[in-house]
């Protein structure tokens, strides 16, 4: 089953303490799958996310000839135990220049970019292609770095589809890659660098501090190169929706189970953002008459403070008693949707005052009302506004199935009674009927 075209969120009638489990990190799962395929032995990933993006990665590895086994996870419906037989850098299947092996990457940036680098280690030709949106997203800096290494990459205007030729006449051993548009370019190279013998210099943005590049390096360092077991942390970006729900419904005393001990995920910092809600007196509809001249909170940066969870913070911001400023948002424009414009448009639709200037959004305390939210086929837009619907009545979410990309059971967790879920109602907006069971799962 799948969710209906439009769902409406209704706050829980009874609020009680909640301890919610969150599926595994998408970023860590797809990095670990690549490392497992390149390892010299069998690796078992426990707590691995099972969503559209990770399913696409698994299917791609199988197309390439890897033996990948997937089993249910008793502790979390959104996870799987995934076992990969690594081949020490060998890629079994390949095509030819005239008939390259077709690899579908959907709209998964991690799959497209990580495999583009990994496939240079193969012995033939591969064509990577995905959705229309994926074909719009930038790949030029990664393509340039792989060409510096001596590999043949055929692409138009630095975009997918691309044809990667693993055969190279005189491969070099060093390249420089810019992460101005995406840190995934550097991560892709680093994941394959051990087998390829590449030296990778990272430039742009703040290459020394980039949180996602650091995550990649830390995972590579800890990964069992000869095979073994790897535990995948819960996804802190996904956890941000439930942490936000806990701030909106403080009686839940909400906790996220198995919170990561490491500092690998930048969105673990979302917990600190919630300090802004302590004693703030969150209002059902936001506005308290505080004027534009009120001192704003310190700015939050997409580059250095939060990752994707900055979107959750932006959607929550109209409920705060002071203006909020969010900076360095440029990278959000070239992800699953043009997220900066989408956030401004949809928050404005709900009655918020939002000012967009360059790559900055300023959000003012506002009186909010429900609206029908366009999701732009973007899972994070859908989940952010569904969370807001726990406080603002009448929030309706179009195309809720887009959450399948990273969190297929998101709406099921909203609707599950405490202590395992929030206990909200998720209605079919057309019929008004409350959804239950399999009808709450995206697909």
Image (spheres, grey):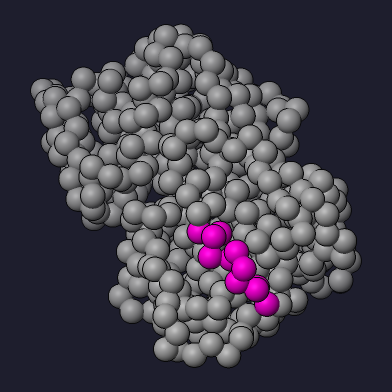
The number of discs equals 0
Q: Nearer the viewer, residue 69 or 164?
A: 69
Q: Which percent across, then down, holds residue 266?
A: 43, 46
Residue at 44% in and 37% down: 263
Vertical placement of residue 344 versus 174, above or below: below
Q: Which residues are magenta?
A: 273-283
Q: Nearer the viewer, residue 110 or 64?
A: 110
Residue at 85% in and 51% down: 417
Q: Nearer the viewer, residue 229 or 68?
A: 229
Vertical placement of residue 243 versus 290, above or below: above
The quadrant in which residue 210 appears is top left
Q: Which percent across, then down, holds residue 39?
A: 41, 15
Vertical placement of residue 110 versus 218, above or below: below
Q: Is residue 440 visible?
A: no
Q: Which percent across, then down, holds residue 179?
A: 25, 48
Residue at 19% in and 50% down: 204
Residue at 61% in and 86% down: 288
Q: Does residue 12 appear to the left or right of 247 in the view shown? A: right
Residue 280 is a magenta residue: yes
Q: Which percent across, then down, holds residue 56?
A: 53, 38
Q: Does residue 104 appear to the left or right of 440 in the view shown? A: left
The quadrant in which residue 90 appears is top left
Residue 279 is a magenta residue: yes
Vertical placement of residue 67 versus 392, above or below: above
Q: Is residue 302 visible?
A: yes
């Amino acid at each position: 089953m799948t969710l209906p075209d439009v769902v409406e969120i209704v706050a829980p009638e009874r609020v009680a303490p909640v301890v919610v489990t969150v599926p595994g990190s998408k970023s860590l799962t797809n990095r670990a799958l690549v490392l497992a395929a390149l390892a010299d032995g069998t690796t078992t990933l426990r707590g691995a996310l099972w969503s559209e993006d990770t399913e696409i990665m698994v299917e791609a590895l199988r197309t390439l000839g890897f033996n990948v086994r997937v089993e249910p996870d008793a502790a979390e419906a959104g996870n799987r135990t995934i076992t990969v037989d690594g081949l020490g850098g060998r890629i079994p299947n390949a095509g030819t220049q005239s008939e390259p092996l077709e690899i579908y990457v959907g709209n998964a940036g991690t799959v497209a970019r990580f495999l583009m680098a990994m496939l240079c280690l193969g012995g033939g030709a591969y064509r990577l292609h995905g959705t229309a949106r994926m074909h719009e997203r930038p790949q030029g800096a990664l393509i340039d770095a792989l060409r510096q290494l001596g590999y043949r990459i055929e692409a138009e205007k630095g975009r997918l589809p691309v044809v990667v030729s693993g055969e190279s006449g005189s491969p070099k051993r060093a390249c420089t890659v810019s992460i101005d548009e995406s840190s995934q370019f550097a991560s892709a190279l680093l994941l394959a660098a051990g087998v390829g013998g590449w030296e990778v210099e990272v430039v742009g943005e703040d290459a020394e501090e980039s949180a996602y590049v650091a995550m990649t390096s830390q995972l590579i360092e800890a990964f069992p190169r000869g095979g073994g077991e790897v535990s995948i942390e819960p996804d802190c970006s996904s956890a941000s929706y439930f942490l936000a729900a806990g701030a909106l419904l403080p009686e839940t005393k909400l906790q996220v189970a198995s919170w990561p001990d490491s500092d690998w995920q930048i969105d673990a910092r979302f917990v600190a953002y919630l300090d802004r809600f302590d004693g703030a007196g969150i209002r059902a509809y936001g506005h308290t008459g505080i004027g534009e001249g009120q001192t704003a909170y310190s700015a939050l940066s997409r580059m250095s403070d939060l990752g994707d969870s900055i979107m959750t913070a932006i959607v929550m911001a109209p409920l705060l008693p002071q203006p909020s400023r969010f900076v360095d948002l440029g990278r959000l424009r070239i992800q699953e949707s043009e997220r900066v414009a989408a956030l401004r448009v949809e928050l404005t639709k709900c009655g918020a005052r939002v000012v967009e200037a360059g790559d900055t959004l300023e959000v003012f305390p506002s009186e909010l009302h429900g609206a029908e939210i366009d999701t732009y086929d973007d899972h994070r837009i859908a989940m952010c506004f569904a969370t807001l619907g726990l406080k603002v009545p009448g929030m309706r979410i179009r195309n809720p199935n887009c959450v399948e990309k990273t969190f297929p059971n998101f709406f099921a967790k909203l609707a599950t009674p405490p202590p395992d879920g929030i206990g909200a109602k998720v209605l079919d907006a057309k019929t008004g009927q409350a959804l239950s069971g399999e009808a709450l799962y995206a697909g």
